[in-house]
Image (spheres, helix red, strand yellow):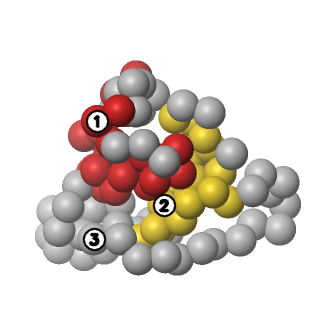
Amino acid sequence: MSENAIEDPNDTHEITESAAYDRDQPLSTAVIDAVADAADLDPAELGTPLYDQIDPDALDNLFSDRHNGTPRGSGHVVFTLLDYEVTVYSDGSVVVRE
């Protein structure tokens, strides 16, 4: 993953980790990796499964290309995992805030 911070001037939470996911891997994997990096843990040690907070398959499909190959529009989804606020943007950015 490469660093790619997105700033929201209305957000008071500090960005702990930000990354751009590789579209060759599932988005859910990128989220787990980013939260694990923020928590300074191995992804297997997170303790809380992603599916307890959001459906990983739905997340993987949310911003994937349409069936005809065209990209989906812009948008984002926000949820909490552990004590972190996770924001996933349609451009592939994953931002983790405390």
Under circle 1, the secondary element is helix
* Residue 47 position within the rendered picture, expressed as x and y whole percent measured from the top left: 39, 25
Which of the pair 98/27 is nearer the observer? Answer: 98
Q: Quadrant of residue 54?
A: top left
Q: Is residue 11 left or right of residue 50?
A: right
Of labels 1 and 2, earlier in sequence is 1
Above or below, 52 against 64 in this view is above
* Residue 15 position within the rendered picture, expressed as x and y whole percent measured from the top left: 67, 60
Identified at 41% across, 25% down, the residue is 48
* Residue 10 position within the rendered picture, expressed as x and y whole percent measured from the top left: 84, 60
Q: Separation of disc 3 and disc 2 at Cα?
A: 11 Å
Identified at 35% across, 71% down, the residue is 1
Identified at 34% across, 43% down, the residue is 42
Identified at 75% across, 66% down, the residue is 8
Crowd around label 3: few <14 · some 14–19 · many ≥20 (10 Å):
some
Q: Amino acid at mark 3?
A: Asp
Q: Separation of disc 1 and disc 3 at Cα?
A: 20 Å
Circle nearer the viewer, 1 or 2: 1
Q: Amino acid at mark 2?
A: Val
Crowd around label 1: few <14 · some 14–19 · many ≥20 (10 Å):
few
Whether residue 91 is visible, yes or no, is: no
Mark 1, residue position: 44
Mark 3, residue position: 22
Of labels 3 and 2, earlier in sequence is 3
Mark 2, residue position: 94
Q: Amino acid at mark 1?
A: Ala
Q: Is residue 84 left or right of residue 48?
A: right
Circle nearer the viewer, 1 or 3: 1
